[in-house]
Image: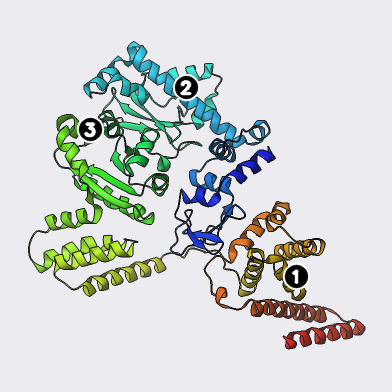
């Protein structure tokens, strides 16, 4: 198995692989990017093509290889990532040993299997039994054909307390498992019953068509019941990550280089039936960071298709906040001739086709909406327009786009661009002050200059084009014990021993031979010189001597502590002599 993992890593070009998810820029021998796993403005994410590794030197501090990147990006287990990369590289996997060890993966696979069976159960009830006739008639009234019903595996949960429970029990699933997977509810008396009863069922799938959970629409029963109920948060279903229809839409999204985002399952299904295949649906909430991260894999453009009411407008505004972080090109389609995409396509298919062919850039749409809300040619109306639009422009991350809309707004408000710029500056300052008034987040303690220099010098050495001669020259000056961090000392000592034994050292092989606890430390050191910091402007010789100086200062402090704790005069004399010798060495530097 170990050989198969190494073969997968060898066959993957890590720059090409990670570059298919995020934008990488050349930085010497390595590549850099803004870290995709936490919010930041300056790029701290570094990828080494030579060693097949990546590391974030920002707040999250994550790092690893291609497998770890895919695990983080898609929030999947080691084995799931391994299986996907094996398929990509054509490596045949033997999972016997790992599948026994990876209990998280085993549970996930079991729960996915349970949901697939539940989906087939609901689909069968809808299509093959009298219990599903009412739901079937409802779908016919919504003009959905059988091939679409089958494509989306729509189903029906009968008005029974335990039909699904009994079915899954026959398939060797326990009630506690069904409860944890969101299919059952536990009563106060401790009994279990089906969560979904008397509802039209929509399976919620991921991009690989795994059934993660369900959404159920009420068809009968009390009006007090919720129109829709969804699977709660489970080990495999997380609402923030789910986009309805993504499994069927992703190929067309890649082809069209655009995705239409609607609210609700039927607003995605109806366009799909009419040949519009790059639609996905969110569930009554603004777009989340996780959903956008998934879409960023396939496109840089998103088109929001929302209702033309106040709620739709607010949903659009909320979507901007997260989408701007990913530098999406955001456009909007507003349906003003029907209540939603489902109705628009059924009643006015030609209008719908023309409408989606000409989406409006998001900020043009917001400006136009504000102008409609305040049509008067008065100073107060223009003030209101400014108050609505300036907070939107302030969020634009791309400087070209931001400047364009600053000029446009200045023209509409009949003021100078400097006025708009000053208002944006005031807003930024106000937001900053508000954030300072809140409870401060405890950021990770930054490395001291002493530790940073250690890391930087070692990184420059390990990344050097002609390493072996430089190693020997530097290690004539530096000793392993000069490095402050115990791990740095261990790595440099092992490396010093390696260059003593061999004329030429393979840096990649050296890193692979380190112990499990030292490998991630070595990876971080190796990539550190490629990050942005002031040390790159300082000479290497000076930094090497500074390491020695720090070491001797530490030695002096250590000797002084020993002196304070001793009473034996003979030992005190020896310590004093040692102190003088160290002080001489320090002065000589």
Q: Nearer the viewer, residue 478 or 284?
A: 478
Give the alpha-carbon distance from disc 3 to disc 2, as whole Å.
Answer: 29 Å
Residue at x 32% of width, y 61% of height: 395
**Viewed as shown, does residue 285 lie left or right of 18?**
left
For label 2, the residue is 117
**Viewed as shown, does residue 516 lie left or right of 78?**
right
Give me the disc on residue 342. 3
Q: Is residue 190 visible?
A: no
Give the alpha-carbon distance from disc 1 to disc 2, as whole Å.
Answer: 64 Å
For label 1, the residue is 472
Where in the figure is residue 14, as x and y percent of width and height? 55, 50
Categorize mark 3 by other alpha carbons within 10 Å: few (<14), some (14-19), many (20+). Answer: some
Q: Quadrant of the N terminus?
A: top right
Q: Earlier in the sequence, mark 3 or mark 2?
A: 2
Q: In the rendered image, which quarter is residue 567 located in?
A: bottom right
User: Which of the two marks, 1 or 2, is nearer to us in this view?
Assistant: 1
Q: In the rendered image, which quarter is residue 347 located in?
A: top left
Residue at x 38% of width, y 36% of height: 251
User: Which of the two marks, 3 or 2, is nearer to us in this view?
Assistant: 3
Where in the figure is residue 412, as x and y percent of width and height? 14, 65
Residue at x 43% of width, y 19% of height: 121
Q: Is residue 372 above or below residue 460?
A: above
User: Which of the two marks, 3 or 1, is nearer to us in this view?
Assistant: 1
Q: Disc 2 on helix, strand or loop?
A: helix
Where in the figure is residue 374, as x and y percent of width and height? 12, 59
Q: Disc 1 on helix, strand or loop?
A: helix
Q: Disc 3 on helix, strand or loop?
A: helix
Categorize mark 1 by other alpha carbons within 10 Å: few (<14), some (14-19), many (20+). Answer: some
């Amino acid at each position: 198995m170990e050989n198969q993992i190494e073969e997968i890593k060898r066959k993957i070009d890590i720059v090409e692989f990670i570059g298919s998810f995020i934008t990488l820029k050349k930085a010497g021998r390595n590549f850099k990017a803004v870290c995709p796993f936490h919010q930041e403005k300056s790029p701290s994410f570094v990828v080494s093509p030579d060693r097949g590794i990546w590391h974030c030197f920002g707040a999250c501090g994550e790092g690893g290889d291609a497998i770890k990147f895919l695990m983080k990006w898609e929030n999947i287990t080691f084995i799931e990532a391994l299986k996907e990369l094996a398929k990509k590289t054509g490596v045949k996997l033997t999972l016997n040993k790992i599948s026994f060890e990876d209990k998280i993966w085993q549970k996930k696979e079991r729960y996915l299997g349970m949901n697939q069976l539940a989906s087939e159960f609901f689909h069968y009830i809808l299509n093959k039994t009298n219990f599903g006739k009412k739901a079937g008639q409802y779908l016919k009234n919504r003009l959905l054909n059988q091939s679409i019903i089958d494509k989306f595996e729509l189903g029906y949960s009968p008005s029974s307390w335990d039909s699904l429970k009994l079915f899954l029990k026959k398939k060797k699933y326990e009630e506690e498992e069904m409860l944890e997977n969101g299919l059952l509810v536990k009563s106060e008396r401790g009994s279990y019953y089906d969560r979904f009863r008397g509802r039209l069922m929509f399976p919620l799938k991921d991009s690989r068509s795994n059934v993660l959970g369900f959404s159920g629409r009420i068809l009968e029963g009390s009006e007090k019941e919720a129109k829709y109920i969804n699977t709660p948060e489970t080990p495999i279903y997380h609402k923030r990550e789910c986009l309805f229809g993504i499994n069927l839409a992703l190929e067309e999204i890649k082809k069209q280089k655009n995705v239409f985002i609607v609210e609700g399952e039927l607003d995605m299904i109806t366009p799909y039936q009419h040949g519009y295949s790059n639609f996905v649906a969110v569930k009554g909430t603004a777009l989340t960071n996780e959903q956008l991260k998934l879409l960023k894999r396939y496109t840089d453009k998103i088109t929001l298709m929302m209702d033309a009411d106040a709620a739709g407008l607010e949903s659009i505004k909320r979507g901007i906040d997260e989408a701007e972080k990913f530098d999406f090109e955001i456009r909007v389609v507003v349906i003003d001739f029907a209540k939603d995409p489902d109705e628009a396509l059924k009643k006015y298919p030609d209008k719908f086709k023309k409408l989606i062919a000409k989406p409006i850039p998001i900020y043009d749409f917001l400006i136009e909406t504000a102008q409609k809300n305040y049509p008067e040619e008065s100073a107060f109306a223009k003030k209101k327009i400014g108050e609505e639009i300036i907070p939107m422009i302030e969020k634009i991350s791309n400087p070209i786009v931001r400047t364009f809309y600053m000029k446009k707004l200045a023209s509409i408000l009949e003021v100078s661009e400097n006025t708009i710029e000053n208002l944006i500056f005031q807003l930024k300052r106000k937001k900053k002050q508000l954030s300072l008034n809140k409870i401060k987040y405890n950021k990770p303690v930054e490395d001291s200059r002493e530790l940073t220099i250690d890391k930087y010098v070692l990184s420059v050495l390990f990344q050097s084009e002609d390493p072996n001669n430089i190693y020997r020259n530097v290690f004539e000056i530096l000793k392993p014990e000069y490095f402050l961090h115990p791990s740095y000392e261990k790595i440099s000592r092992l490396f010093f021993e390696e260059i003593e034994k061999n004329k030429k050292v393979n840096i990649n092989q050296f890193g692979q031979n380190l112990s499990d606890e030292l490998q991630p430390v070595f990876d971080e050191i190796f990539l550190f010189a490629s990050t942005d910091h002031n040390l790159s402007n300082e000479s290497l010789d000076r930094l090497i001597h500074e390491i020695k100086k720090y070491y001797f200062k530490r030695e002096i402090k250590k000797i002084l502590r020993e002196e304070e704790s001793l009473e034996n005069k003979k030992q005190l004399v020896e310590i004093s002599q040692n102190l003088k010798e160290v002080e001489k060495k320090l002065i000589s530097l």
